[in-house]
Image (cartoon, rainbow, N blue to C red):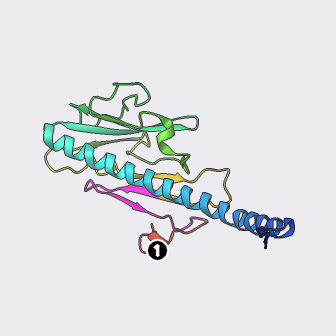
Amino acid sequence: MNRIHYLRGFTLIELMITIALLSVLLVIAVPSFNEFRQRAALRGAADQVATFWGDARFEALRRNQFVKVGFRTSGANFCLGAATTTNQGDDTTCDCFTANACNVSAYPTNQSDWRGVRVAAATTLGDDDGGVIVINPKRGNVTETADVGRIFLGTPVSTNANYRLSIDFDRNGRAVVCEPTDAPHKLPQYTNRRC
């Protein structure tokens, strides 16, 4: 006897219901994933600024020279530069936008390294708000006690969530990453590190 076996597949209705469910899940997941990526980029950028500062302090001690750390902006672009100096009151920034202009270090080499992070408020580095702090090569602290301040970073403006972090520089030469108390959205990792 000859038996014919029919292969059972999906009906068009079953396939459409599955596609509709997957579409709903995707619509829910994509904004959460984008927000996660932005928070990670912000934390990474803040950590990079703190690491840059630590490296500049190390270079001041290693070279036994004053090292000035500067923060520059040009429109939406911004960078950090470190250069040696002989003047502990030096308030001129090295041009970190130009290759090899800072003889210690510069970050970033490409603005895309910030991964969409922006400057969220005016920087307040240095006693004249010029964006420069000079590091003492003997102790690793700042040369002038008024040369303290902070850099505010935030997630891109085009997003719904507005996360912000601050990198605070104190007169003892420490850089601390914290979350401003007035930040519109809170990062759970910084609940104990508000500033």
Disc 1 marks a residue whose amino acid type is Thr
Percent across and percent down for residue 149 are 40, 52
Report whether 53 appears left or right of 24: left
Q: Residue at x 45, y 48 (%)?
A: 124
Q: Is residue 143 visible?
A: no
| The image quarter in which residue 103 lies | top left
What's the magenta region?
A: 166-183
Q: Which residue is mark 1?
A: 191
Query: Does residue 169 show up magenta in the picture?
Result: yes
Residue furthest out toward the front? 1
Q: Residue at x 56, y 51 (%)?
A: 120
Q: Residue at x 32, y 29 (%)?
A: 102
State how many labels appear.
1
Q: Is residue 161 visible?
A: yes
Which residue occupies the foreground of this view, 120 or 35?
35
Percent across and percent down for residue 129 are 44, 43
Q: In what element is the residue under mark 1?
A: loop
Percent across and percent down for residue 42 are 50, 55
| The image quarter in which residue 16 lies | bottom right
Which residue occupies the foreground of this view, 36 or 187?
36
Which residue occupies the foreground of this view, 83 or 161?
161
Query: Does residue 83 show up magenta in the picture?
Result: no
| The image quarter in which residue 18 lies | bottom right
Which residue occupies the foreground of this view, 7 or 71?
7
